[in-house]
Amino acid sequence: MRTEDVLAAIDTGLWRWNNASGTVTFDAEAARLMGLPAEEVQLTESAARARFHPVDWNEIQGIVQLAVTEGTVAEARLRVMSEDGRQVLRTVRSRSKPFGAGTGYQLIGTIQEVAETAPGTAARTPVTGDWRRSREAFLLDAGRALAEARSTAEVLRVAASLSMPGFSPDGLAVFGVAGDRLTTIGHHGHKPGDEDPFRDMPLETDYPAAEVVRTGRAIYLPTPEEYRTRFPATWPLAEGFGRRSWAFVPLVVAGRTMGAWMAGFAHPVAFTPDERSVLTTVARMLAQALARAGVEESERELSEGLQRSMMPTLGPDIPGMKVAARYVPTGGGLQVGGDWYDMIPLPSGRFALVIGDVQGHDVRAAGLMGQLRIALRAYASEGHRPDGVLSRASRFLHGITDTYAPDDHSSPRFATCLYLEVDPADGTVELARAGHPEPAVRMPDGTVLVRTTAGGLPLGIDADTDYPTTRLALEPGETLMVCTDGLIETGGHDLDSGWSRIRTILESHTELDLERLADDLVQAVHGPPSHHTTGPLSDRREDDIAVLLLSREAARTDKPSAVRSTAMTVAQAEPERIAGTRRQLRELLHDWADEDQVDSAVLMVSEMVTNVLVHTDGDALLTARATGPVGSRTLHVEVTDVSDELPHKRRPGEMASSGRGLLLMEMLAHKWGVDPRGQGKSIWFELYEDAPPASYEDF
């Protein structure tokens, strides 16, 4: 009698699932149980899947994979659905044995109808009932928690907190492989020191975890007797923990066994196919989480090492000055980009401060930054002036980035840079700027001025670019701040709104602690307050941040200076910088008592500088000083040029477009004059804060 006939006599069908061809064959009895005509039939996988409840089909796929891996029997309960998929026809039990391995296995088994379990009689019936739903919810939560873990320690904490449905372990251990040794990565449910015998063990040891790593197959030990029989050499190590069952499951990533996971139970566990399926699924997720955490930790370690090598310390203390700096990566990739800062001792006894930003936030930007930083140090150490240092650096960067193909997405690259040469003896600062944000100065009374400076193109764009030098003096008690655009524009800010945010931090800082100020500046951009001060742009753009602070110390006996001053040059070729003079003056007079006087001063300065550019062949030098206590200050503004021709007061006609400069000063200034110099002349005016403003309504 055929096997099929014997099975049919006991209402049992036979089926074959050929994974290689993607077909499922049912004999006559199996076809009847599936709700098909009682004759042998071959269906595609999709057609066979349509006969089962979709949840059950997904379950059996996982159970089959487990049986293929372990070489065991796959057993499951399945609900057979009607043709329209709306009604459960019957529940069947399938027992099958896989033959073959990998992706080309065949599954041969039996199907037999079983009675549906009565509610409440077996909460842990395999693959059905409440236990199934608890298992699915558990695996969903476990997968989400492990996916969110970002370090090995976090992965181990999540693994320790997993509460498996119906059979939670009371002890866990994760083993790794180092060469030919088994190592302990982490553990839970053990006292300190319990892991010592397992910490460094040869892979040849007769220990379950070592065998799992060697063979790639799970080991389930439902009783202490089975543990003692199979692993007598290492049973004494496990006996003292008082557990009743153990599961050792391989941790496999991309086909490679990277370690083993041990789950120990204080109560007996039979390790049914469903329980083994849960353990195998958790082990697979745990392995993926550990591998991902290992990669991230390696990248983080590489990033931190790269940062340490590329971000030098600021060097020795400078007499009479303090320096502080911060670098904050954008938070992506290797945590390093193209921003940098540096402090360079110079042969002249001065020192140089450099801050820059190479285009990009990737490894190539970091590499170019390292090369450019070294080049700048070399040029500075040769004794070149700021303009010469930047000119040579631009040619250097242009040379090393101009060799890439035009279609290469990584080239060409440029860099912005600000180079300052500082004399600590008198606070003189000479600087050259290559497309970089301008410096800001905080005065002792909290006034902050963005120092308008001449500049050239970013480094690397044009090999023959010139970089004019700007000279300024850092007074005792003043703090100079230079930064990359990340400090200004991160958080959706543009240049104007970003400077306003930074100005608020600088003005509100009343302490003399430069390190605290550096922290506050970074906190304003990356800390919780940044989420309440978003800029006008729709996105919250992120960028690397580098900030450098230089403060000239005031003598302890000195009182805070009551003098505010600013100076800037407007060249003949840069008439657009007249707007900068107006902005500088408004910033200098930000707390002036009378806004009308501020408007008058801005109007007169604009007229004076414009006259120099229109009527002479030289540049205009503007200096402005506010002296005296608040409320009774004197503003002295002076514009100097090299022309010996003195201005003349005229009476312009109604339609005249010029000739009103001196008339304005006569009507708006409290005091004004024109002073000849050895070469050139100086036009000046004064305004008094406690005097009534002049009126020009009838002018």
Image (cartoon, helix red, strand yellow):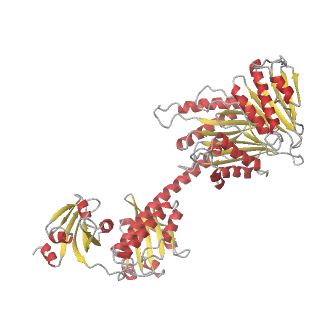
Residue 694: horizontal and vertical position, in percent? 86, 32
Q: Is residue 347 visible?
A: no
Residue lying at the far left in this picture: please name it. Answer: 1
Q: Nearer the viewer, residue 629 or 664?
A: 664
Q: Is residue 97 above or below residue 501?
A: below
- Whether residue 579 sits left or right of residue 689 in the image: it is left
Residue 308: horizontal and vertical position, in percent? 62, 49
- Whether residue 7 sits left or right of residue 627 in the image: it is left
Q: Residue at image x 48%, y 75%?
A: 171
Q: How many marks?
A: 0
Q: Is residue 416 above or below residue 48?
A: above
Residue 47: horizontal and vertical position, in percent? 23, 61
* Quarter of image, res 257: bottom left
Q: Nearer the viewer, residue 373 or 52?
A: 52
Q: Is residue 444 above or below residue 670?
A: below
Q: Quadrant of the C terminus?
A: top right
- Whether residue 366 sits left or right of residue 137 in the image: it is right
Q: Residue at image x 63%, y 32%?
A: 393
Q: Is residue 147 above or below residue 515?
A: below
Q: Nearer the viewer, residue 664 or 675?
A: 664
Q: Residue at image x 20%, y 61%?
A: 43
- Whether residue 638 sits left or right of residue 298 in the image: it is right
Residue 184: horizontal and vertical position, in percent? 49, 67
Q: Is residue 156 visible?
A: yes
Q: Quadrant of the N terminus?
A: bottom left
